[in-house]
Amino acid sequence: MTSAAPAASTIAKGILKDVVAPTALQPGYIVFTLPGTSYQIHLRPQGDIRSAPGQRIKGSIRCQARRVDRSGTGGRFVEPVFGRPRRLQGTVIGHDTSANAIIIDAGGSTVPGFDGGLPITCVLSDARQKPGDFQVGDLVGFDVFEGATFTQA
């Protein structure tokens, strides 16, 4: 990974609220929560989830971004608060040029032990955009394709 941020900054820390098994109509997902917030983010697990509901969990969150735009105002967030990520806004904290991705901090918890932001690796899907188009510190916003994933560390 080519990054301006240390590797540890790509690890999200939260609480595993639930593991939902797949059905004939939808793939399985986990419910990832951030203490001190209302977030209940639905993510598709990659590999085994070794934590039990109610326990701390840490790992990497990855999504595929539609066209990424710089924002002049606003904060860092995942939208909606409950469900699968559909829109993200955050600060660029690094690049992964080998994966054509930027790493953003989309907010996070202020609870001790969980502080450190909510890092999300965002693969750029617009062929006109490259990670180098965005500087560390840029505030960016974009829609997210369905299928954001979580890989437990």
Image (tube, rainbow, N blue to C red):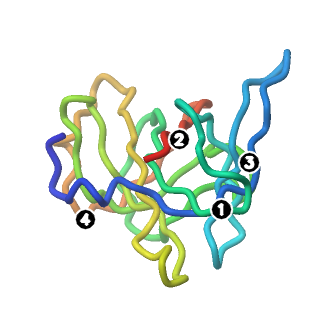
Pointer 1 or 3: first along the chain: 1
Location of residue 97 in the rendering, given as x and y in whole percent from the top left corner: 19, 35
Pointer 2 or 1: first along the chain: 1
Q: Which residue is mark 2?
A: 150
Q: Which residue is mark 3?
A: 83
Three-letter amino acid code at the position of disc 1: Gln
Locate the N terminus and report the quarter of the image it occupies: top left
Location of residue 142 in the rendering, given as x and y in whole percent from the top left corner: 48, 45
Label 2 or label 4, whichever lies nearer to me, is 2
Can you tell which quarter of the image residue 111 is in? bottom right
Pointer 1 or 4: first along the chain: 1
Local secondary structure at mark 1: loop
Mark 1, Cα crowd under 10 Å, few <14 / some 14-19 / many 20+, is: few
Distance between mark 3 and mark 4 Cα atoms:
27 Å
Distance between mark 3 and mark 2 Cα atoms:
14 Å
Label 2 or label 1, whichever lies nearer to me, is 1
Label 3 or label 4, whichever lies nearer to me, is 3
68 shown above or below 11: above
Distance between mark 2 and mark 1 Cα atoms:
15 Å
Local secondary structure at mark 4: loop
Mark 3, Cα crowd under 10 Å, few <14 / some 14-19 / many 20+, is: some
Q: Which residue is mark 1?
A: 55
Location of residue 5 in the rendering, given as x and y in whole percent from the top left corner: 20, 59
Pointer 2 or 4: first along the chain: 4
Pick whichever, 122 or 72, lies toward us. Answer: 122
Q: Which residue is mark 4?
A: 137
Three-letter amino acid code at the position of disc 4: Gly
Label 1 or label 4, whichever lies nearer to me, is 1
Residue at 57 percent across and 34 percent down: it is: 48
